[in-house]
Image (cartoon, rainbow, N blue to C red):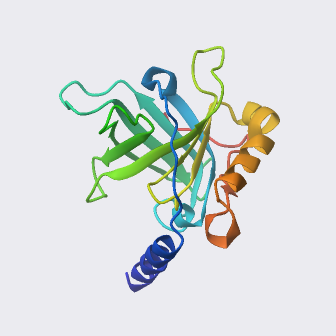
Amino acid sequence: MKRFSAIFAFFAFFAISNATKVDTVNELNVDQYSGTWFQMYSNLPVMSTFEKDNVCVTAQYGPPNPTIKIADVSVKNTARLTEPTNGTIAGITGYAYIPDQSEPGKLKVHFDEGAPVDADYWVVDLGPINSDNKYDYAIVTDNIGLTLYVLGRDVKEFNMKYNTNVLDKLDELGFNGKVKEPIPTYQKSDCEYYW
C-alpha cells in the first residue's frame, strides 16, 4: 500500500508541475465511436497503476443502459493478466457520459466498482471513418494530459496505416519523455480475447 501511495504521489506531483493544455475534438459521434477497440498504446501512469501486468487490452463501447439517465455509452474494458493465452481475465464495466454537449470530446467515465469518482476521458484525436462507419482510431487522455490511451479498431491495420502518424501526433501533443511517452500495449497474434 505504501508503494502505491508513493507512486500516486509522484504522478500527482508530476501532473501538477507538468500539466498540459488539452484540446479535445470538436465533434464526436457516439454511434461511430461505439464498438470494439484494441488498446495500442498507453503510458507509464496507466501501465504502472490500474493496468499493471495487462496484455491484450480491449474496450467495448455500446448502447447505454436505459435506466442510467446520464449515460451516453456503456463501457466494458477487459484484459489478460501477464499471459496472452492463459492469463487471468480482468475487466471492469461502467458507462461514459458527456457532461456538456457543447464539448463532446470531454467525457466522464463512471466505473461500477473501484474508482471513487468519475474519471475524465478526453478524446483529443480521431481517425478517419472506416467502411463500418466507425472511427478507425482514437487518442484519449485526461484533463491534464497525463494518462494516455491509443485505441485502434484492427491491430494489423492500425500498425500498417496509422502507427507512424499517430506517434507523430502524440509527440506533438506532448506525450514524450520518460513518464508520458507512449508504451505499446501487447497485442500479438497469440492474444485470446474475452468478449
Residue closest to the eye, 145 or 46: 145
Q: Is residue 74 left or right of residue 141?
A: left
Residue 59 position (above or below residue 86): above
Residue at 20%, 32% (x, y): give it.
Answer: 68
- Residue 94: tell me if it is visible: yes
Residue 152 position (above or below residue 44): above
Residue 18 point in image, percent of width and height: 54, 71
Residue 38 point in image, percent of width and height: 60, 39
Residue at 65%, 59% (x, y): give it.
Answer: 175
- Residue 84: tell me if it is visible: no
Residue closest to the eye, 168 or 118: 168
- Determine the image quadrant of residue 54: bottom right
Count of numbered marks: 0
Residue 187 position (above or below residue 37): below
Residue 95 point in image, percent of width and height: 32, 38
Q: Quadrant of the N terminus?
A: bottom left
Residue closest to the eye, 140 or 75: 140
Q: Is residue 56 left or right of residue 113?
A: right
Residue at 65%, 31% (x, y): give it.
Answer: 127
Residue 13 position (above or below residue 172): below
- Determine the image quadrant of residue 191: top right
Residue 10 point in image, percent of width and height: 48, 80
Residue at 44%, 83% (x, y): give it.
Answer: 6
